[in-house]
Image (cartoon, rainbow, N blue to C red):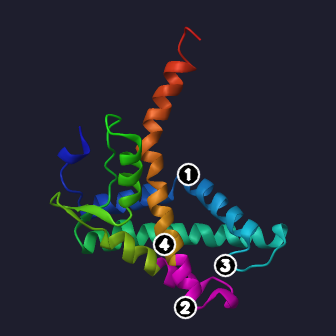
Amino acid sequence: MAMDSLPPPSVQEKWNVFQHEVVTPLMIGAGAIDAAYSQAIHSTPLYGRHWGEAYPKRFGAAIGDIASQDFFGDFVLASAFHEDTRYRRRSSTHKFWDRVTYAVSRAVVTKTDAGQATFNWANVFGTAMSAGLSNAYYPDISRTAPAAAKNWGKTLGDSGLANLLPEFWPDFRQWVKKHLLSPSH
């Protein structure tokens, strides 16, 4: 069944989306990558430079950031604003850059539960709420308004880039099956 023909998600289904996104190996991978990047460039949260001490703290903070953003964006605010945050993939009949632009734009554009395009209040405000909450577990030096604003902007941008995975993964998987796993190879 095509995504556009699905009925609007109930509040329970939005809770299930949140749970599914948080309890997945991809979350661990995303947290590990985010923490490694933050550690490598010494960005907020500033836990220090020693990988053995700072990286595990950054990893925990990254997991907290992802989980809280998913909670606020995919459940609380999506329910309050009646937004359907399920990603709707474009088909491979669209041009590559059109698909990239579409995927990234979903950070700020989504569908209402009624199926109309709307500003993605849930994601924009959800990432802001997550950035604010991070002040509860970030070190003192990283608990500033500019640091929270930078965290919010980075997380909002990351959510757009993260949409590239569901947009292109099925095509990549199909290409691998056809070219690398077919009996003729």
Q: Nearer the viewer, mark 2 or mark 3?
A: 2
Q: Nearer the viewer, mark 1 or mark 3?
A: 3
Direction from residue 19 to residue 115 in the image, left or right: left
Residue receiving disc 1: 26
Which residue: 84% across, 67% down? 52
User: Please, what secondary structure does the residue beneath circle 4 have?
Assistant: helix
Direction from residue 14 to residue 63 in the image, left or right: right
The region drawn magenta spans 130-151
Q: Are marks 1 and 3 in contact (CB under 8 Å)?
A: no
Which numbered disc, 4 or 2, marks the residue that appears first in the sequence? 4
Distance from disc 4 to disc 2, alpha carbons, whole Å, reads 18 Å
Amino acid type at image mark 2: Ala
Q: Are marks 4 and 3 in contact (CB under 8 Å)?
A: no
Which numbered disc, 2 or 3, marks the residue that appears first in the sequence? 3
Q: Looking at this view, is 142 or 79 the one in front?
A: 142
Q: Is residue 183 above or below residue 38?
A: above
Residue receiving disc 4: 68
Query: Split into 4 quadrants, where in the image is the N terminus?
Result: top left
Residue receiving disc 3: 45
Tell whether position 101 is magenta: no
Where's residue 77, x and y in %?
A: 32, 73
**Quadrant in the rendering for residue 9:** bottom left
Mark 4: few/some/many CA within 10 Å (<14, 14-19, 20+):
many
Amino acid type at image mark 1: Leu
Q: Nearer the viewer, mark 2 or mark 1?
A: 2
Amino acid type at image mark 3: Pro
